Amino acid sequence: MSNTLSSRWLRPETLTAVGTILVAGAFLRPTLDLRPMSALLPAAMLIALAVLAATLMILDQRKAAKGQAAEPMTKAPRRVLGAFALIVLYTLGVDFVGFYLATAVSVPLVAYAFGFRHPGGLAAATLIVLADIWLIFSFAMSQEFPTGRFWSM
């Protein structure tokens, strides 16, 4: 890949970073309409995501300036596409069956997809994630999560 300015911006990591910053910014806008306590976590996560993406972009551009070749987008494209499919299914699951049930199914599926195969570890990780979310948000902050359209019919 030549080291021209236009080709430097077409490197996979730079494109991923720019796309992530744009999406995080687009999702950050609706948090301004939420109550401050409700907006705190999503806004903080989106800002952190944008900062991490900007860091990725800066590091990749430094590599490009040194003439290093761009790394391939992924070594396991099916795994990445599967992870994106799980994210889409998770968001639909939250909408239809509720946050806790969708999370209880998604956490072990994502861990399994990325190579963690121990059933006891999958169960423990799922319980820890769900318990922590419940303790922090439902119990300590009195926040409610979606219960799902399926249960409200």
Image (cartoon, rainbow, N blue to C red):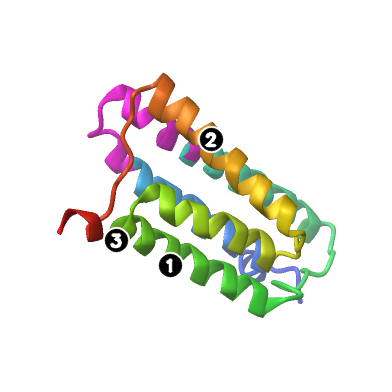
Which contiguous range is marked in magenta? 29-45
Q: CA distance from mark 3 to mark 2?
A: 21 Å
Looking at the image, which is closer to me, 55 or 2?
A: 55
- Residue bearing mark 1: 89
Q: CA distance from mark 3 to mark 1?
A: 10 Å
Kindly identify the amino acid type of the residue bearing the numbered disc 1. Answer: Leu
Q: Can you give x and y, in whole percent of width and height, for residue 109 in the image?
A: 59, 64
Q: Can you give x and y, in whole percent of width and height, for residue 62 in the image?
A: 77, 51
Judge left or right: residue 150 versus residue 110.
left
Which element type, helix, strand or loop, lies under badge 1?
Answer: helix
Kindly identify the amino acid type of the residue bearing the numbered disc 2. Answer: Ala
- Residue bearing mark 2: 131
Which element type, helix, strand or loop, lies under badge 3?
Answer: helix
Which of discs 3 and 1 lies nearer the camera? The answer is 3
The quarter of the displayed image where residue 7 is located: bottom right
Quarter of the image with the C terminus is: bottom left
Which labelled disc corresponds to residue 96?
A: 3
> Mark 3 packing: few (<14 Cα in 10 Å), some, or many (20+)?
some
